[in-house]
Image (cartoon, grey):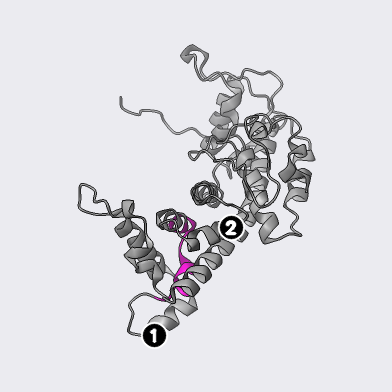
């Protein structure tokens, strides 16, 4: 089928939304919003409140009490939530880079430990159809991240040194992406060093910590690219730990919410941030954001269970 829809003017966009049952208190103000926030971007916030299953309904709104301003309020809430989460994820990313580099560099006495095949799980050396391995992919990603870096310490390294052709771990780890960091940790073979990194963040299971890093990486990308997170079903389903260094939650508690919704990620994030930065304001800022009146906001759609603040990890 060929896509044949024609572009709509701002006035036509408003008319279309109004025809589908959305209320407008001030169309001039709505036009200003739509000139800066695209109709299609806002579609992610109107979609949950429309009939999207019956073609004959033409995406009619299923509630009569929703205004355009309600949609904007929800959009702003999501933007503020992303900013809050992104700030906390920065702490996690920087801390994991630091721990990974420090622990492996000290233990191996090798500044380029990340290039040593002996450090990695045997499974990462299985070749794909093109003859490449996951180890090759990780090394390529690290090199690409280093090559594109504009950091002065990377430039200084290459101006002063001819070899080795890659900077030491304490430089390279500082410029790799969260995605590369996640892949690197997962690919490392289970060892005292890998366990020590996870233990530094209150996690005793290396596979679970790898899962959290993968999930955080996806969440970080959503925040960096201004994607919706408030009611998203994330690709990575978060594993829940039952044997942690600090209070988290019971197995029964974990069964009360979905592990692919934002609440699960917020919970894991809070647990890690409390270890990295004990006097952080993450919970305070989150509660403030949630306490503000939002007509369309549903904590249930975000994966929050009832009495979520009584979970051990959230009582601190």
Q: Secondary structure at mark 2?
A: helix
Q: Which residue is mark 1?
A: 159
Residue 175 place in picture, x, y as percent: 47, 67
Image-based side of 89 in relation to 283, left or right: left
Q: Quadrant of residue 21?
A: top right
Crowding at dot 1, Cα within 10 Å, few <14 / some 14-19 / many 20+, comes out as: few
The correct choice, above or below, for 229 with respect to 189 in the image is above
Residue 200 in percent (x, y) is at: 60, 60
Residue 118 in view (yes/no): yes
Task: Give residue 242's mark.
Answer: none
Q: Which residue extends farthest bottom?
A: 160
Is 171 part of what is drawn in magenta? Answer: yes
SS class, disc 1:
helix
Above-or-below relation of 165 to 115: below
> Quick check: 292 left or right of 276?
right
| 121 shown above or below 175 | above
Give the x, y percent position of residue 268: 62, 46
Crowd class of label 2 (few under 14; some 14 to 19; many from 20; radius 10 Å): some
Which residue carries the number 2 mark? 199
Q: Main secondary structure of the magenta part?
A: helix
Q: The magenta stretch spans which residues?
A: 167-181
Q: In the image, what residue occupies the spot 54% across and 61% down?
A: 196
Q: Position of residue 17 (x, y in %)?
A: 58, 26
> Could you tell me if residue 27 is visible in this image?
no
Judged by depth in the image, the label closer to the viewer, 2 or 1, is 2
Q: Which residue is depicted at the point 39% across and 67% down?
A: 114
């Amino acid at each position: 089928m060929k896509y044949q829809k024609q572009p709509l003017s701002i006035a036509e966009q408003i008319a279309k939304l109004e025809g589908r049952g959305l209320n407008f208190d001030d169309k001039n103000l709505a036009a200003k919003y739509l000139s800066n926030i695209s109709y299609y971007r806002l579609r992610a916030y109107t979609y949950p409140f429309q009939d999207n299953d019956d073609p004959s309904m033409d995406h009619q709104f299923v509630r009569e009490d929703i205004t355009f301003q309600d949609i904007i309020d929800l959009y702003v809430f999501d933007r503020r939530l992303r900013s809050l989460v992104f700030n906390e994820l920065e702490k996690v990313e920087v801390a994991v880079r630091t721990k990974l580099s420090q622990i492996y560099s000290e233990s191996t006495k090798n500044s380029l430990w990340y290039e040593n095949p002996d450090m990695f799980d045997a499974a990462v050396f299985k070749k794909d159809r093109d003859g490449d391995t996951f180890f090759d992919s990780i090394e390529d990603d690290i090199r690409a991240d280093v090559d594109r870096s504009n950091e002065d310490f990377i430039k200084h390294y290459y101006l002063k040194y001819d070899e080795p052709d890659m900077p030491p771990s304490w430089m390279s780890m500082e410029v790799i992406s969260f995605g590369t960091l996640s892949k690197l940790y997962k690919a490392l073979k289970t060892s005292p060093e890998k366990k020590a990194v996870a233990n530094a963040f209150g996690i005793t299971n290396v596979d679970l910590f790898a899962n959290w890093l993968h999930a955080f990486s996806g969440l970080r990308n959503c925040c960096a690219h201004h994607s919706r997170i408030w009611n998203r079903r994330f690709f990575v389903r978060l594993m829940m730990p039952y044997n942690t260094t600090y209070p988290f939650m019971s197995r029964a508690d974990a069964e009360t919410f979905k592990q692919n919704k934002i609440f699960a990620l917020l919970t894991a994030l809070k647990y890690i941030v409390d270890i990295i930065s004990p006097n952080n304001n993450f919970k305070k800022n989150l509660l403030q954001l949630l306490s503000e009146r939002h007509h369309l906001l549903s904590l249930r759609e975000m994966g929050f269970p009832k009495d979520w603040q009584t979970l051990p990890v959230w009582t601190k």
